[in-house]
């Protein structure tokens, strides 16, 4: 079986609910196989203790941006340096994974050498510690998914790829919007098979609030999300799971069939992923997505307002 290194940059193990769901998630990765490694990156409160308790690898010395947020490029590079695994998989620390993850990987590796595996998640309300052991998901996974909600395709919570891919990532802030979209864009730009594994990998997200972020605002309204988009090159690089070019259905890897929407989308991203021409890609994006540009402007105004309010709160703090 292929050796896989699952890695993440956890939130602080301070909030009681966050503690529970992160321990649940990490334990679910640990029992997948003897060929699995798990790495926790960053020196946030409680991470070292959790790594020791759960038997995961621990890498504290992550680089950070000016706001003190761990950087994606540093996280990926540190794990690549520490692990010899053939396949790397970044996963958000609230995601429960099951054997279908590794089973799907073997199907993909048998047919393509360069790939990025992504997929939509199932959102579920989980508030208690789970009894996680080998085979635990056989009953838990279908029962939980039956009451869960399939998340929209705009966000991605896991990225599985060969260790030699994604060696030149910009210094994105983890936990903010934009970097995950860029990953899909970069994979298409590099000519990788971008595999939508939603039908094959039923990963479960444990719902939580955003109290860990400044003022409790959702990540896309954070100023660091705007900086992530700038580092990515702009809105035209904000790809989603819908921009995959392969899919797994009934255990088979195949090209995604063209329909009217998919054809239009492939035409609109052609300058970006095939011609590698940023200026033309920006023009074509604007022509195909005028409503999105208006929404971007509105969100930029919201972020600007939030940034001003947040700076005012900081200046008003005593001491």
Image (cartoon, rainbow, N blue to C red):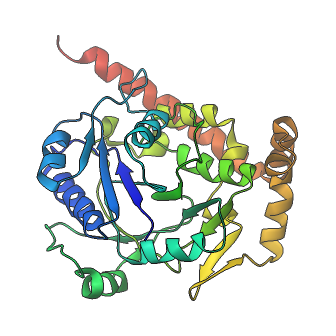
Question: In the picture shown, does residue 204 fall above or below 167?
Answer: below
Q: Nearer the viewer, residue 248 or 103?
A: 103
Q: Nearer the viewer, residue 95 or 221?
A: 95
User: The C terminus is located in which quarter?
Assistant: top left
Q: Is residue 142 visible?
A: yes
Classify residue 54 as left or right of residue 85.
left
Q: Position of residue 23 (x, y in %)?
A: 19, 58
Residue 43: quarter of image = top left
Q: Nearer the viewer, residue 261 or 9?
A: 9
Q: Residue at x 36, y 81 (%)?
A: 145
Classify residue 277 as left or right of residue 20.
right
User: The N terminus is located in which quarter?
Assistant: bottom left
Q: Is residue 156 visible?
A: no
Q: Position of residue 132 (x, y in %)?
A: 18, 73
Question: In the picture shown, does residue 201 fall above or below 96?
Answer: below
Q: Residue at x 34, y 62 (%)?
A: 36
Q: Position of residue 101 (x, y in %)?
A: 43, 72
Q: Residue at x 31, y 81 (%)?
A: 141
Residue 176: quarter of image = top left
Question: In the picture shown, does residue 153 fall above or below 270?
Answer: below
Residue 113: quarter of image = bottom right
In this view, the residue farthest toward the top is: 319
């Amino acid at each position: 079986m292929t050796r896989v290194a699952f890695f993440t940059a956890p939130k602080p193990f301070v909030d009681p609910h966050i503690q529970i769901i992160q321990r649940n998630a990490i334990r679910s990765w640990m029992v997948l196989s003897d060929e699995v490694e798990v790495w926790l990156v960053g020196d946030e409160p409680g991470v070292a203790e959790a790594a020791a308790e759960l038997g995961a690898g621990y890498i504290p010395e992550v680089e950070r941006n000016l706001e003190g947020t761990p950087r994606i490029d540093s996280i990926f590079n540190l794990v690549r340096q520490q692990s010899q695994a053939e396949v790397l998989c970044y996963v958000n620390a609230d995601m429960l994974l099951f054997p279908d993850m590794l089973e799907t990987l073997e199907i993909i590796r048998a047919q393509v050498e360069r790939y990025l595996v992504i997929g939509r998640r199932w959102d579920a309300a989980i508030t208690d510690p789970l009894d996680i052991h080998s085979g635990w998901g056989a009953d838990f996974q279908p029962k939980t998914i039956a009451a869960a909600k399939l998340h929209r395709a705009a966000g991605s919570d896991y990225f599985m790829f060969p260790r030699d891919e994604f060696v030149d990532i910009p210094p994105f802030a983890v936990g903010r919007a934009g970097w995950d979209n860029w990953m899909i864009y970069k994979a298409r730009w590099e000519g990788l098979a971008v595999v939508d594994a939603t039908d094959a990998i039923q990963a479960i997200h444990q719902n939580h609030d955003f109290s860990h972020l400044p003022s409790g605002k959702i990540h896309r309204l954070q100023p660091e999300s705007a900086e992530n988009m700038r580092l990515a090159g702009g809105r035209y690089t904000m790809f989603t799971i819908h921009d995959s070019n392969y899919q797994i259905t009934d255990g088979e890897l195949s090209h995604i069939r063209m329909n009217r929407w998919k054809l239009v989308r492939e035409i609109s991203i052609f300058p970006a992923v095939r011609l590698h021409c940023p200026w033309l890609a920006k023009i074509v994006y604007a022509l195909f997505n005028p409503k999105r540009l208006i929404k971007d402007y509105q969100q930029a105004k919201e972020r600007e307002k939030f940034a001003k309010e947040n700076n005012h709160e900081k200046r008003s703090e005593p001491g």
